[in-house]
Image: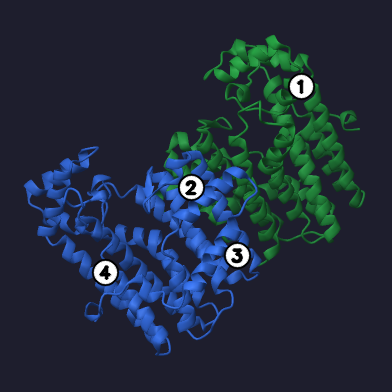
Chain colours: A green, B blue
Amino acid sequence: MISETAPVSLADLQVGLGPRIDEVRAQIRRAIAADFPLIADVNSHLMQMQGKMFRPTLLFLVNRACGHPDERAVRLAAVVELIHLATLVHDDSVDHSVMRRGMPTINALFSHQISVIMGDYLYSRAVIELVELADLKPLEVLSRVTNEMTIGEMRQLLAHDPLTFSEADYDLLIRAKTASLISGACECGALRASPDVRQAMARFGNALGMAFQIIDDLLDFTEVEAVTGKPSGLDLREHKVTLPLIHALPKLSAAQRADVDALMATPEPSAEQVARVVAHVRDTGGLDYAKARAHRLAEDAVRELDRLPAGPDRDLLRASVAFVTERRK
Amino acid sequence: MISETAPVSLADLQVGLGPRIDEVRAQIRRAIAADFPLIADVNSHLMQMQGKMFRPTLLFLVNRACGHPDERAVRLAAVVELIHLATLVHDDSVDHSVMRRGMPTINALFSHQISVIMGDYLYSRAVIELVELADLKPLEVLSRVTNEMTIGEMRQLLAHDPLTFSEADYDLLIRAKTASLISGACECGALRASPDVRQAMARFGNALGMAFQIIDDLLDFTEVEAVTGKPSGLDLREHKVTLPLIHALPKLSAAQRADVDALMATPEPSAEQVARVVAHVRDTGGLDYAKARAHRLAEDAVRELDRLPAGPDRDLLRASVAFVTERRK
């Protein structure tokens, strides 16, 4: 069903939402503003670094589709994106990442110390924003989600040993790391709806978020570097074990397995090593399996939309599922 | 007035509070419990590392003294201590500290990555606890305080250049870094009191917290290492500029100033270098000035207590001020 839809772009989903998304950016800018020069410097870098607003877009689409417009939607969307931003700043610091969205990370451009403090700054500002809304419901959703994300980050630290990291562990990881905030965004879009619609939207976001992360991890195997023509395989280079490899591992020949072990034992694997392991994972069905899993989750997500009134807004949420599963980058 | 009181110990302030402080520890243990083994390991280390519960003690004393007992006092005290713990975990990570309260820090014992994630875990748990209390008031106080502390941490990063770091900067630093949470603890003890008592208790905590940090910084100059008999001067070793040095700087002779500059330019200053600078700061009145400043703040704090009904509980709060100014470690 999903695979029959035409490729969908994020711009398709955001048609008509441009002014609201601009408002989200303005709200974030206001919420994080600081007199303190160092924080103002980091903020202006962060504002340039901002992403495509996928989570705010979902919140707006859910809010329209569930038929209970919430006048707080822009502020809620801004808080969700702010929490996302805080998480990215700490993740980059934990991972020692140097680039994010084509720009240097806060830890790379400023320092590791500044990125730890800035993540705390952004998150505590998000809580202040939520308190100003004077409603415990979004606070309840987003404080739970934020805590789940920290547990996801802890799980990520353990996702470097293919012998012990199972598909069940992987599911827990992507649920906590990625799906929880996407689910929280969808749930925050449905706070004015009935409890069963609200819960359905939380489940929709959870399935969509898990599919999103599986596709992300799959693209890491299939994306090809422009210059070398070889798979980029960044996760493999960093010894991060994801679904395609987890599925392939028990099916590998002894020789193939030796290549995986060698890669995992090499601090900086070569492009050839990475390409060889990608080929083994492909040959033993790891990529197909991950794709099929993402599609099953996408179908779960679409099923939750049955709770919503039929119409163009529900169709856009359906299209957001297609966007996630069909995206090429 | 303060200097006339007899030396007060923390145990004096905590008389009769033992069971409540045990409850605070139990509440913290419950709030941070996790199924995830790595988090459980870090938690059990943190529980051993817990401090003397100065902030919970103040919250209890204020709550009793202002005559509006709050049945949530134990949970509020646990959240305040939990936020304090989260802050310490990130501070140690930012400062690369290896010891805290006689035990290895989380970053030293586990890793820097784990301490960043654990700080986030603890803080998001604190927010969840506050949301469960279903009252926006403590959330409003403590989210503001947490954000102020992150700004304090940023200020701390800049407190390494004696030429640019003024007493006004120092005041802003200690207010944000230390006084804000102590003020928040006192304010949370008075949430059921009238607005003017609540504000007076916030101001009491602010003055007390600033005095607390000044004495802390002063002790760094005056404490003597057991083995060497020389001043420990840990802040000077780490090139942290605090009030005694700020006050002394413009009064130093050229030769004395050269010693300070040399220390600041030495990555790991010797015990002799530190002792020499301590002597210069003492000789130019930096220690006396800091002590007098702490005493003035203590008097400000005591004055705020006039808003409370007279009685043994108010006397204990007065004693808490004496405890802060008279403490020797």
As drawn, the label of residue A118 is 2
Dot 3 falls on which chain?
Answer: B
B56 or B11, nearer to the observer: B11
Picture residue at 87% right of the left edge, 37% below the top: A299
Q: Of discs 4 and 2, which sits in the foreground?
A: 4
In contact (CB < 8 Å): disc 1 and disc 3: no
| Separation (CA) of disc 3 from disc 4 | 33 Å
In the rendered view, tell whether residue B180 sits above or below residue B204: above
Q: Residues within 10 Å of mark 1 (few under 14, many from 20)?
A: many
Badge number at residue B130: 3
Question: What distance separates the C-alpha of mark 1 from that of mark 4?
Answer: 66 Å
**Quadrant in which the C terminus of chain A appears:** top right
Given this view, does label 1 or label 4 mark the residue nearer the observer? 1
Question: Residue B172, image x and y in percent?
Answer: 35, 60
Label 4 belongs to which residue?
B294
Amino acid type shown at disc 2: Met
- The label on residue A172 is none
Indicate the quadrant where residue B176 lies: bottom left
Q: Nearer the viewer, mark 1 or mark 2?
A: 1
Spatial CA span between label 2 and label 3: 23 Å
Mark 3: amino acid: Leu
Residue at 62% x, 51% y: name it: B34
Up-down relation of residue B322 to residue B280 (above or below): below
